[in-house]
Amino acid sequence: MRITGRTLIVASIAVLVTLTVGRAQEAVGPGAKRRVVFVAGKRSHGYGSHDHWPGSLLLSKWLNENHPQIEAVVVRDGWPADPKAFDGAAAIVIYADGGRAHPLVGHLPEMDAMMKRGVGLVLLHYAVEVEEATAGPQFLDWAGGYFKINWSVNPHWLMQAKSLPTHPITRGVSPFETDDEWYYHMQFREGMRGVVPILTALPPDSTLVRPDGTLARNEGPHENNPYVRAAVLERKEPQHVAWATERADGGRAFSFTGGHWHWNWGHPMQRKLVLNAIAWAAKAEVPAGGIETPRVTIEELEAPTAAWLGNPPAAGGGAAPAGQSPTRALMITRLAEWHRAFPPRK
Ligand SMILES: [Zn+2]
């Protein structure tokens, strides 16, 4: 065969394609590490709430220490300046304020390219909200649902998930309840196509109305609206506050509307559910009993928070900074209760 320049170019392309495909297969092979990139939003709230960076640090640490297949890293203060931050990512976790401040605003094409490659997506708390005109259709496509302004609401309530579906995300998770800012009445895909509810509960009427029938919170973009009142007060429709979807491009997504209170990462079941979900989204194996983590202490929870705030808690168990809730003392009590109810296995 006569070797021409054209033959060489074709041969080189063939080698390149083989190498690239080989690397891609290696990246998703059974023994390969899955890289999980957390995008942690800026500080926006008070002590112990919307602790995006501290929460991401803890979740990534628990994954790295307790799941041998996962290599998790955290970038802070929003979308990373370095585009290489997402190289080799099997999944992206966004724990940040949403709406107009959502880290994805201004980066939809980059995200779309990653989604089309089958990269997993996990959206925590406010990161489930985006303006409909900005990225509503994209969020329906990527995640199966989102917080839609003037449709969804954001009250604090005791979410009681009395039963859980059979799914890799719920492995080793028992039904549980936590007090959090559980957004509900999400906008989902038409007919819930491809959406698997993971946490479902009927919110109490008190999230919308007082006993005398007056509005618990006035109508507003996040607070109250006639559609949610019809769904919950009249039709008594249970609400999905965490859900999963597998996209046609092969990517997986998980959305979780809790996560306002940093301290709830100390709840063994809330923590395990979200850790399982991140592993699932990254296409890592979720163990039969779920991802086990050792008992979490108040000191472990508050170590990254104190560093973030530059405001370490008082030595020996002082209260949280004035005016913030729940207090440190209450959290110590709650942690003890949770550990009694769900004793850690290690
Ligand atoms: Zn919140």
Image (tube, rainbow, N blue to C red):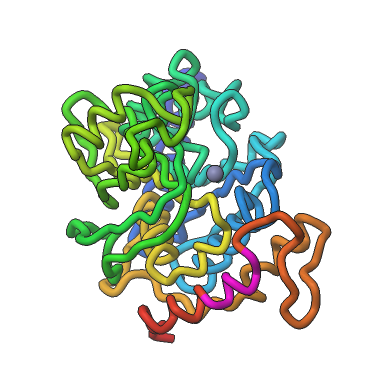
Picture coordinates of residue 45, whole percent (x, y): 67, 45
Residue drawn at point x = 62 percent, y = 58 percent:
325
In the rendered structure, the answer to whether residue 242 lies left or right of residue 134 reads left
Residue drawn at point x = 27 percent, y = 61 percent:
170
Residue drawn at point x = 46 percent, y = 76 percent:
293
Q: Does any portion of residue 91 appear in the rendered image?
A: no
Picture coordinates of residue 339, whole percent (x, y): 44, 81
Outermost front residue: 212
Q: Along the line of sight, which residue is nearer the eye, 125 or 325?
A: 325
Q: Along the line of sight, which residue is nearer the eye, 247 or 245?
A: 245
Residue 328 is inside the magenta segment: yes
Query: To which quarter of the image does residue 154 belong?
Result: top left
Q: Along the line of sight, which residue is nearer the eye, 208 or 48?
A: 208
Which region is colored magenta? 327-333
In the rendered structure, the answer to whether residue 201 lies left or right of residue 7 reads left
Q: Quadrant of the C terminus?
A: bottom left
Q: Does any portion of residue 227 appear in the rendered image?
A: yes
Picture coordinates of residue 320, whole percent (x, y): 71, 65
Residue 74 is inside the magenta segment: no
In the rendered structure, the answer to whether residue 49 lies left or right of residue 178 reads right
Q: Main secondary structure of the magenta part?
A: helix
**Where is 145 relative to 40, above or below?**
above
Q: Along the line of sight, which residue is nearer the eye, 287 or 211?
A: 211
In the rendered structure, the answer to whether residue 1 lies left or right of residue 334 reads left
Picture coordinates of residue 123, whole percent (x, y): 46, 42
Q: Quadrant of the N terminus?
A: top left
Residue drawn at point x = 38 percent, y = 68 percent:
269
Quarter of image, ligand 1: top right
